[in-house]
Amino acid sequence: MNRAVINFIFILISLTIFPLMSAFSEEKFDAGSPVAFLPSDIYNFESVPEGVLVTHDFIIENKGTAPLQILSVQPGCGCTTASYTKEILPGGSGKISLSFDTAGYGGISVNKKTLVKTTDPNNSSFRLTITGNVETFAQINPNSAILKGSAGDQNIFKDRQRH
């Protein structure tokens, strides 16, 4: 009889504990995960003169059921800087602002990429692209000149006027 009672208690405990453990497990699974969504990952700017700062805000949405963390935003070179929303709640949106300094890029068609890392398990990293044409601000021919004299020296101009 003792053995039957012990077996009954064991069965009763098993039927009570295992469903509770399963419920906790499902609840943890149902907590969900973040889902990063970008309406666009490319910004094509119109031609700008060299020296202009091109800035664009990329919108990022969280279509998941858990907060989305933006872990890092790494521009490909020093000519681009970034600022961004660190956390986006479920159903919310944030932005990643990129600024590209066009100085030194005159006459070039640029394609600047930035690496973004997030907590989205299915899209943990992706790239944003800024692309467009940078016009030359000024063209000097010849591309070098030799200047002589001292600042404020008026004699240089007088000598040229005599010749």
Image (spheres, grey):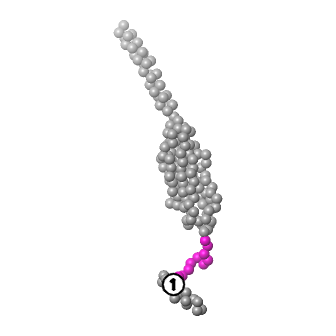
* Pick the front one: 105 or 10: 105
Residue 98 in the image: above or below residue 30: below
> Which residue corresponds to the image point at 55% horizontal and 59% vertical from the top-left?
100
**Position above or below: 135 against 97:** below
Name the element at disc 1.
loop
Going by the picture, which residue comes out furthest to the bottom?
A: 162
Looking at the image, which residue is at 58% across and 92% down?
162
Residue plotted at (61% across, 68% down) = 136
Q: Does the magenta stretch include residue 140?
A: yes
Which residue was labeled with disc 1? 148
**Image location of residue 102, percent across then percent down:** 56, 63
Where is residue 10 drawn, in percent x and y? 40, 16
Label 1 environment density (alpha carbons within 10 Å; few <14, some 14–19, many ≥20): few
Q: Camera-side residue: 160 or 65?
A: 160
The residue furthest left is 2
Quadrant assignment for the N terminus: top left
Report the residue at 49% width, 28% height from top: 26
Which residues are the magenta region? 138-147
| Residue 15 image point, x, y percent | 44, 18
Residue 67 versus residue 84 in the image, above or below: above
Going by the numbered disc 1, the residue's amino acid type is: Lys
- Nearest the viewer among 155 and 6 is 155
